[in-house]
Image (tube, helix red, strand yellow):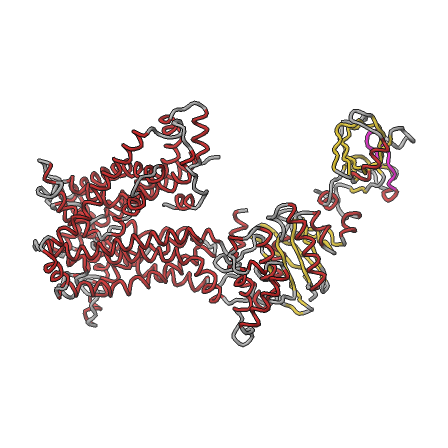
């Protein structure tokens, strides 16, 4: 099912949770709503589910306006942040609930329900735990019950609120992979809320980055990571080094740095350059005057990646660089060494345009 | 954030708001608010001198003193022994502990009139306990205190118990590791934690005692000026069809209870703030 | 007033005290056993001996007298009246308690805290005053007295008055048990149910009710015990008409004041058995509720 969010606004008292949000989601997409807490992502998800009303705008499912349709008629599956499993029901009864509460005319027979539930439990690999109560399950198992329960009603849209938030790192990774697989099999339009950029990049095929009730950027994981449209997105997705300097004749100057920024030929003002750690070039011997001297303060070995903390020699500022283990070995550098650095790729934002 | 959460719930999809709120308000108004307001309406129809004379009648004043004094005494007895009992039930193991724990609820479950006649018989001059004393227990203020102690005990035990249960053993261990002996640990670490619950327990017992009637009338002897409690004065006036007088005394009692609850809430607010600051 | 306490009640798990042995952490055996002795003596004097007195006095003159006392027509009439009152009051207050707890815990609205305070109000009112207010409303000189007389409706000194006064006194029990419990449970399970397509009624019946059943039962038990035993309020409105408007506690009072001690204690013993059953059920509920 395709979803259109048209100019949706929502206030809680004087707090604006969402302001003029518009999104087009195509059928079968797997979307991540990414943002810090308070960015409005959960509110948007709850509005899509019909658990929350909206102040302005409209929600369209397959082109039909369902803004005032109750959640029970929206054909959605909602997976709650803390699962909201019915604690007095077994795993089986939890999954069967959505089918059992249907009006008598639409309700499948007992046998059909049992078959459906057992199939779903097999799918989430919980068929041997059908008689357990939620309190007897681990976090990952509860999460899978919640998913099975949401899928049982054959939703046209699957909405997940921080689906992996309460799980430990290892289970999280596993479930992430599993959710992607599930989506590939069922192709039900799915939207999940997360504040974890890695999760969003890993699972989704499109990411909606939100901040302060507004959309910062919509794009594929690659687009939002490689080509952030705002300082916020730059900052929120991955680590970043800031070069606060002045624009002058198409160059950004900071300390001894002079970096070419041809797009800002006519600008003469304060600006900030954003550079990812892996976009910092390091050399042991100065090859040209575009580089600046810096001292290595600390070296983190993180498996295949090496993080290097540097202190600039020209001004009192710290930088973070990232190189592969291989390249690190080639460089043959150690703590205390003086090296020469330059940004390979940099993006400039003028602060007035983007107040963070 | 507080505000936003409040507003968020307002537009919830949970059904039944108007139905349950409407029903609750109507039921509350018919059963509680309208009847209770009668006390104040009827009082307003009295002249001030009439009202003042009724409520300051020596018999009434003696009953206020008796009611307050015995409620206070019983409250103090209950705080001391109720806390000890709660302590024993949480911290120690002994045979029959489950039974003892259950019996603490007896005053909640036993009708007050039944408790009244049982206590009166037990503490009367030739009762099982009364015979050992050469002064009167039943039919004296002492008897009233005993009845009120009976009524109020579970309030203290049941409020102190959960607090004691949830007291983290870490703070006690920390205190011991810093060189405090058991008495010091109790006075400086445990007691301050228990104090708010003890105050709550006391106030619940005391509030109940102020209005208590059933258990007292049998053991008090009901001698005017000596062992006549305020609720009994209301009762006597009603039996004489003196509705105006009964209402006036009831006003005094209601104002006193509300005032007491108000003060207790302030004290609780203060102690909670003092002890739960971090 | 006990709000803070109730929150603490369901906090951290129980700590195993047996593991701690050091004297810096535990009192000496002398202190321990003196405290236990003091507690047991106190409970014996104030709770256990009175309970024993009831049964001993009731059976003093033998089984036959005991049976005769509790099967006396007046006693039977009192039992019947008390049961009638219970059957009307407890369901009414249960429905009210559930509705009030629902509106207070599932929604947030202006005046919510005031509503909680108002529900607790009857606990702060003397039972005698609880009776008095209904006399002032429906008595001969009361607000509606004249009108009721003209239409030949009896409220005071009749069953309706007894019921009204008892409802007033036992009004908060169910709501008070449910409010902290439902507050803790929040609304997510209800939301999950609605999102799975259940109607409001089905959500309440299949999700909310099973979640609160032990707390509800607990409140009903307490409400029931107080309804059976209410004395002060009923005493004011009943008019003490023997065989007609005497509930069990009032019947006991009359017998006691007529020096028919054995008969009084015989009826009292019945009520004590009910009280003991109440305590047993209460403990079973607490045990069950912990299990879930």
Q: Is residue A256 magenta?
A: yes
Q: Is residue A285 magenta?
A: no
Left or right of B178? Residue B135 is left
Image quadrant in which you'd find residue B150:
top left
Observer-nearest of C261 and A221: C261
Q: Which residues are magenta?
A: A252-261
- Residue C132 is at least partly visible in this image: no
Q: Is residue B230 above or below residue C63?
A: above
Left or right of A16? Residue A199 is right
Where is the N terminus of chain A found, in terms of image quarters? bottom right
Image quadrant in which you'd find residue C139:
bottom left
Please tell me which residue is depicted at 48% across the width and 67% down the height of the picture. Answer: C202
- Residue C230 is at least partly visible in this image: yes
Observer-nearest of A356 and B139: B139
Residue C199: image location, x then y, percent: 51, 67
Observer-nearest of B251 and A41: A41
Residue A42: image location, x then y, percent: 61, 53
Left or right of C249? Residue A64 is right
Q: Is residue C71 above or below residue A248?
A: below
Q: Residue furthest top?
A: B179
Q: Main secondary structure of the magenta part?
A: strand
Residue A121: image location, x then y, percent: 60, 62
Where is the C terminus of chain A found, in terms of image quarters? top right
Observer-nearest of C145 and C246: C246
Residue C169: image location, x then y, percent: 27, 55
Q: Residue furthest bottom?
A: A105
Q: How many marks?
A: 0
């Amino acid at each position: 099912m395709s979803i259109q969010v048209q100019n949706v606004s929502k206030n809680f008292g004087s707090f604006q949770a969402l302001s003029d949000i518009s999104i087009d989601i195509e059928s079968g997409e797997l979307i991540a709503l990414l943002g810090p807490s308070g960015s409005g992502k959960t509110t948007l998800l709850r509005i899509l589910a019909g658990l929350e009303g909206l102040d302005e705008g409209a929600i369209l499912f397959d082109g039909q306006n369902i803004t005032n349709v109750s959640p029970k008629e929206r054909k959605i599956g909602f997976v709650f942040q803390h699962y909201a499993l019915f604690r007095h029901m077994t795993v089986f009864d939890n999954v069967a609930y959505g089918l059992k509460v249907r009006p008598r005319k639409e309700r499948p027979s007992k046998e059909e329900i049992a078959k459906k539930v057992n199939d779903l439990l097999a799918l989430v690999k919980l068929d041997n735990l059908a008689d357990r109560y939620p309190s007897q399950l681990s976090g990952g198992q509860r999460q899978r019950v919640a998913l099975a329960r949401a899928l049982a009603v054959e939703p046209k849209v699957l909405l997940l609120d921080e689906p992996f938030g309460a799980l430990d790192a290892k289970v999280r990774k596993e479930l992430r992979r599993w959710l992607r697989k599930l989506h590939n099999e069922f192709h039900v339009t799915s939207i999940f809320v997360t504040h974890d950029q890695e999760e969003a990049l890993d699972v989704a095929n499109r990411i909606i980055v939100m901040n302060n009730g507004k959309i910062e950027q919509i794009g594929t994981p690659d687009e939002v990571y490689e080509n952030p449209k705002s300082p916020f997105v730059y900052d929120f997705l991955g680590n970043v080094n800031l070069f606060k300097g002045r624009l002058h004749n198409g160059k950004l100057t900071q300390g001894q740095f002079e970096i070419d920024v041809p797009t800002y030929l006519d600008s003469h003002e304060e600006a900030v350059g954003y550079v990812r750690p892996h976009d910092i070039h390091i050399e042991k011997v100065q090859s040209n005057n575009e580089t600046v001297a810096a001292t290595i303060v600390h070296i983190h070995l993180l498996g295949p990646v090496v993080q290097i903390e540097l202190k600039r020699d020209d001004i009192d500022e710290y930088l973070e660089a990232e190189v592969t283990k291989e390249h690190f070995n080639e460089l043959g550098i150690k703590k205390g060494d003086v090296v020469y650095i330059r940004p390979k790729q940099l993006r400039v934002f003028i602060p007035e345009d983007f107040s963070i | 954030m507080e505000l936003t959460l409040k507003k968020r719930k307002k537009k919830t999809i949970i059904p039944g708001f108007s139905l349950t709120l409407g029903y609750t308000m109507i039921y509350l108004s018919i059963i509680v608010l309208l009847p209770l307001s009668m006390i104040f309406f009827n009082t307003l129809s009295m002249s001030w001198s009439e009202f003042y004379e009724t409520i300051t009648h020596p018999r009434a004043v003696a009953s206020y003193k008796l009611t307050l004094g015995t409620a206070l005494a019983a409250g103090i007895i209950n705080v001391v022994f109720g806390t000890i009992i709660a302590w024993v039930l949480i911290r120690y193991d002994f045979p029959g502990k489950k039974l003892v724990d259950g019996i603490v609820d007896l005053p909640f479950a036993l009708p007050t009139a039944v408790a009244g006649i049982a206590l009166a018989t037990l503490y009367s001059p030739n009762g099982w306990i009364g015979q050992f004393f050469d002064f009167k227990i039943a039919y004296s203020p002492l008897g009233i205190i005993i009845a009120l102690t009976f009524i109020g005990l579970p309030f203290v035990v049941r409020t102190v118990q959960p607090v004691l249960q949830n007291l983290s053993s870490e703070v006690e261990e920390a205190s011991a590791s810093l060189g405090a002996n058991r008495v010091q640990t109790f006075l400086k670490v445990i007691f301050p934690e228990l104090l708010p619950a003890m105050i709550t327990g006391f106030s619940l017992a005391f509030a109940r005692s102020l209005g208590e009637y059933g258990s007292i009338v049998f053991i008090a002897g009901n001698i005017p000026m000596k062992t006549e409690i305020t609720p009994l004065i209301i009762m006597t006036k009603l039996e004489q069809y003196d509705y105006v007088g009964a209402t006036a005394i009831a006003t005094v009692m209601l104002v006193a209870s509300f005032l007491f609850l108000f003060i207790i809430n302030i004290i609780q607010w203060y102690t909670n703030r003092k002890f739960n600051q971090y | 007033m006990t709000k803070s306490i109730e929150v603490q009640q369901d906090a951290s798990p129980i700590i195993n005290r047996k593991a701690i042995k050091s004297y810096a952490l535990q009192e000496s055996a002398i202190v321990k056993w003196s405290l236990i002795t003091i507690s047991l003596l106190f409970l014996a004097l104030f709770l256990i001996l009175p309970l024993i007195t009831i049964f001993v006095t009731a059976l003093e003159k033998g089984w036959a007298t005991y049976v005769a006392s509790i099967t006396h027509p007046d006693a039977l009439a009192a039992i019947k009246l008390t049961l009638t009152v219970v059957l009307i009051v407890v369901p009414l207050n249960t429905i009210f308690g559930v509705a009030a707890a629902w509106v207070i815990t599932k929604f947030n609205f202006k005046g919510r805290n005031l509503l909680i305070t108002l529900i607790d109000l009857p606990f702060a009112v003397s039972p005698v005053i609880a009776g008095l207010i209904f006399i002032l409303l429906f008595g001969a000189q009361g607000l509606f007295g004249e009108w009721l007389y003209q239409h030949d409706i009896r409220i005071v000194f009749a069953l309706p008055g007894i019921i009204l006064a008892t409802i007033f006194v036992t009004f908060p029990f169910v709501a008070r048990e449910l409010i902290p419990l439902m507050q803790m449970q929040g609304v997510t399970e209800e939301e999950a149910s609605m999102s799975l397509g259940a109607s409001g009624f089905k959500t309440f019946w299949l999700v909310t009710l099973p979640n609160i059943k032990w707390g509800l039962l607990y409140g009903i038990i307490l409400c029931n015990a107080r309804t059976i035993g209410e004395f002060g309020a009923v005493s004011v409105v009943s008019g003490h008409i023997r065989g007609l408007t005497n509930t069990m506690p009032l019947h006991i009072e009359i017998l006691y004041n007529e020096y028919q001690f054995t008969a009084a204690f015989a009826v009292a013993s019945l009520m004590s058995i009910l009280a003991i059953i109440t305590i047993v059920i209460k403990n079973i509920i607490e045990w069950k509720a912990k299990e879930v």
